[in-house]
Every structure is written in C-alpha cells, then in structure tokens.
Image: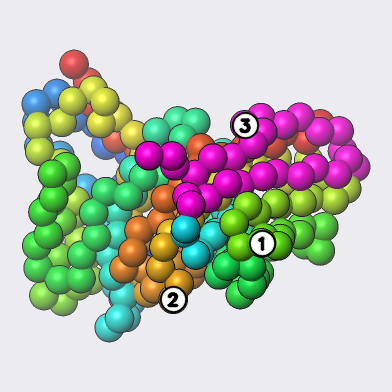
Amino acid sequence: GAGVSQSPRYKVAKRGQDVALRCDPISGHVSLFWYQQALGQGPEFLTYFQNEAQLDKSGLPSDRFFAERPEGSVSTLKIQRTQQEDSAVYLCASRTEASGASQETQYFGPGTRLLVL
Amino acid sequence: LAKTTQPISMDSYEGQEVNITCSHNNIATNDYITWYQQFPSQGPRFIIQGYKTKVTNEVASLFIPADRKSSTLSLPRVSLSDTAVYYCLAGYRVYQLIWGAGTKLIIKP
C-alpha cells in the first residue's frame, strides 16, 4: 500500500528565501510528526499533530518555522527567511494511534533534503 | 526523558549474528524500548519494540534484562543489505524520544 510521501525530495534555496515542504501521510492516520535530521545525526522532533490540531510545537527551532495540517491529512512545514543552519533533511511520520504513546510505530516518509546556500 | 547510549559503529560479516547493545540507565516505568533502522536517503523504519524480557519478530530479537537499564538488538545471519544506521530509543511519548546518532552497522562480504 501507499506509504508516507514527501515533496519535494530535494530543495535548494537561497538564504532568505521562504520554502514549503509537503507531507502526505498514510490515509486514515491520525497523528503526524515532523522531524529535522542533520547530517550524521538522528532525527530531532519538531512538531506533532493529532488530526488538524497541533498539540506540540516545542521542537520548532525558531518562529521562522511554521507547520499546519488544516484538514487533518496533508501537512505543510514552512520555513521563512531560510538560513544556512536550516540545511537538513526534514522527515515526516504518521501513525494511527492518537495518544502519542510510543507503543505504536511511526511510519516515516523519505524526507526532503533542504540545502540553503 | 530517557537518553540512550549505543556504539557509534560496528562491523560484521555476512552470515554472522550481530548484537547491538544500548544502555538507558534512567528509563522510566512506562517507557518502551524501540529500535529503528535507517538506510541512506530514506526515513527510519521500525524494527522491533519491547518492554521487558525477550521479543522476537521476523527480522530481529530484542533482549531486555530485568532491570531494563539496557537492551540488545540481535540480528541473525546478517547480509550486506543490513548495512544501515540503527537507533535505540527509550520513552513513552513518541514525540519525546531522544534519537541520538545511532549505530552505523557495516556488513562486509
């Protein structure tokens, strides 16, 4: 079946440019997560949605980062005025379970590799 | 939040059993232990999860001693395609899991 998809797969932006990264979760999945993965490091949590509600955004590194999931399915992570330190892979994950407990696995997309020049 | 410690890298050979040990000294009562695998240019993929004793599935086994302060991922008869980064995670809320840098496993022919 279809997994989590993300687009674009690669994005090159000039410093100061705004970017939008899209995540299509598995159909019917309630929870959606965004992560940032720097080169050689593990993913770091950015934000979490349960349906359309953003329940936790404690991992967003600055107010230049904004995420939304208006209809409880597709989500967009927007980065305004990109900086070189924003260069990373941005991963999206989804799962059916709503509580946030770790007993149920997350399904990850392939990620969007962002390079800010 | 439980932080985990695992080897930065490991080498092994095709056909061997590989054991990756992870320590999580401050694991909490409700925390589960979860392992993910990640190939280059892909998102992490769930391998196995457990709470205590032993869990086995079609790809791996997970051994957790009674004190739960460590765990061991066992991959039987590895092949070249098992070359990847393996992450050990300990926690209850999935969005509070601390991933760390993982263990880079290299399988040689």
In this view, the mark in front (1 or 3): 1
Question: What element does badge 1 sit on?
Answer: loop
Q: Which residue is mark 2?
A: A99
Residue drawn at point x = 30 percent, y = 53 percent? B35
Specify the quadrant of the image occupied by residue A47. bottom right
- What amino acid type should be assigned to the residue bearing mark 3? Arg
Residue drawn at point x = 69 percent, y = 36 percent? A114
Decide if residue A80 is on the left or right side of residue B100. Answer: right
Label 2 or label 1, whichever comes before in sequence order: 1
> Marks 3/2: CA distance?
29 Å
Q: Is residue B88 above or below residue B7?
A: below
Q: Are both tags, 2 and 1, on one chain?
A: yes
Assess whether residue B91 is covered by the magenta stretch: no
Q: Chain of mark 3?
A: A
Q: Which residue is mark 3?
A: A9
Q: Position of residue B21 (x, y in %)?
A: 21, 53
- What amino acid type should be assigned to the residue bearing mark 2? Ser
Q: Which residue is mark 1?
A: A71
Contact between marks 1 and 3 (CB within 8 A): the answer is no
Label 3 or label 2, whichever comes before in sequence order: 3
